[in-house]
Image (cartoon, rainbow, N blue to C red):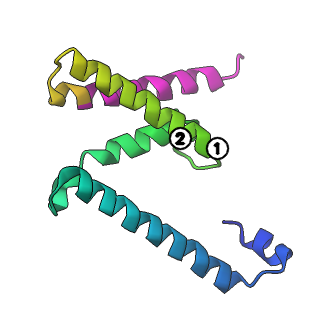
């Protein structure tokens, strides 16, 4: 969130930041309820497998590790592509341990291809 852009828009900075953080908290509550409904338990470690998936989905969607902007459509497409890879591996009866490794490999390959393609020829 750009503080200069908020000031130039004429909105109060504190109120805008409060609204953004409240919206983020509301989204966290909704995602927690969705995970609880999906796992039907209140286990603290129930969502530990989603950390790699969420980061990988955003990186596959076009974001860089250094920050910057990304279109929400890109993150959704990244999540869909990872879900398709996971579904394919589950269909092929691959162990869930290897599925996580495959997701990490996909993430590594995407980052490597981006790094190689962003190099400028000498």
Q: Quadrant of the C terminus?
A: top right
Instruction: Give the quarter of the image for residue 88.
Output: top left
Instruction: Out of 110 and 117, give the one closest to the viewer.
Output: 110
Mark 1: few/some/many CA within 10 Å (<14, 14-19, 20+)? few
Residue 101 in the figure: left or right of residue 22: left
The segment highlighted magenta reads 100-122
Count residues near mark 2 (Cα–Cα under 10 Å), then give few for <14, some for 14-19, many for 20+: many
Residue 13 falls inside the magenta stretch: no
Residue placed most toward the observer, 38 or 54 = 38
Q: Main secondary structure of the magenta part?
A: helix
> What residue is shown with label 1?
71
Q: Which residue is mark 2?
A: 75
Residue 94 lies, in percent from the top left, at 17, 19
Judging from the image, what secondary structure is the residue with disc 2 in? helix
Let me know if residue 107 appears in the view: no
Give the residue displayed 14% in from the left and 24% down from the top: 95
Where does the image place residue 22, in percent across and percent down from the top left? 52, 76
Residue 57 sits in quarter: top left
Q: Quadrant of residue 34?
A: bottom left
């Amino acid at each position: 969130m750009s503080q200069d852009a908020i000031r130039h828009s004429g909105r109060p900075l504190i109120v805008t930041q409060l609204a953004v953080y409240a919206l983020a908290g509301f989204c966290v509550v909704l995602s927690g309820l969705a995970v609880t409904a999906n796992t039907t338990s209140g286990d603290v470690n129930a969502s530990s497998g989603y950390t790699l998936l969420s980061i990988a989905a955003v990186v596959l969607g076009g974001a860089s590790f250094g920050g910057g902007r990304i279109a929400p459509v890109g993150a959704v497409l990244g999540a869909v592509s990872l879900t398709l890879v996971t579904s394919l591996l589950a269909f092929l009866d691959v162990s869930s341990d290897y599925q996580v490794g495959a997701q990490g490999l996909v993430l590594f390959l995407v980052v490597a291809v981006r790094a190689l393609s962003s190099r400028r020829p000498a």
